[in-house]
Image (cartoon, helix red, strand yellow):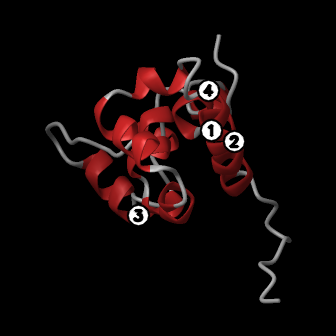
């Protein structure tokens, strides 16, 4: 059972079930492109919003990733499972919390320039 609300997971249920475009990353995949690709014959490789994509490659979170220590940045690219070891769990937990806060920031919240 998953404990997150990324599109890869929420796109599996309710009216969204059965449609890959509800599982795609909204930052990396243009909705119009998804609609076109979905209607074309053949296979296409969508960019799904899953844990690895959000943690390691989605540009929406680059600012958060840039502030990680070099070891954690390296593990994101080479061995994600090691992020959850005793040596790395504290920074990993803070990192995931920041990702979650950014992903689910309320629409009416504005970024302060002060």
One can see residue 17 in this view: yes
Please name the residue that numbered disc 3 is placed on: 30
Q: Which residue is mark 2?
A: 94
Q: Position of residue 74 (x, y in %)?
A: 34, 42
Q: Are marks 4 and 1 in contact (CB under 8 Å)?
A: yes
Q: Is residue 21 visible?
A: no
Between marks 2 and 3 in the image, the one whose residue lies nearer the viewer: 2
Dot 4 falls on a residue whose secondary structure is helix
Q: Nearer the viewer, residue 16 or 97?
A: 97
Q: Which residue is mark 4?
A: 89
| Numbered circle sitting on residue 91 | 1
Image: 109 above or below 72: below
SS for callout 1 = helix
Q: CA distance from mark 4 to mark 3?
A: 34 Å
Dot 4 or dot 3, earlier in sequence: 3
Compare marks 2 and 4 and give the one earlier in the sequence: 4
Please tell me how crowded label 4 is: few (under 14), some (14-19), or many (20+) other residues with Cα within 10 Å: few
């Amino acid at each position: 059972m998953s404990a997150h609300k990324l599109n890869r997971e929420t796109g599996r249920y309710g009216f969204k079930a059965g449609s890959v475009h509800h599982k795609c990353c909204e930052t990396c995949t243009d909705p119009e492109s998804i609609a076109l690709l979905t209607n074309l014959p053949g296979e296409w490789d969508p960019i799904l919003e899953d844990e690895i994509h959000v943690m390691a490659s989605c540009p929406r979170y680059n600012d958060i990733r840039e502030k990680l220590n070099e070891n954690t940045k390296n593990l994101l690219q080479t061995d994600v499972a090691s992020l959850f070891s005793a040596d790395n769990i504290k920074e990993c937990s803070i990192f995931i919390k920041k990702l979650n806060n950014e992903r689910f920031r309320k629409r009416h919240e504005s970024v302060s320039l002060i």
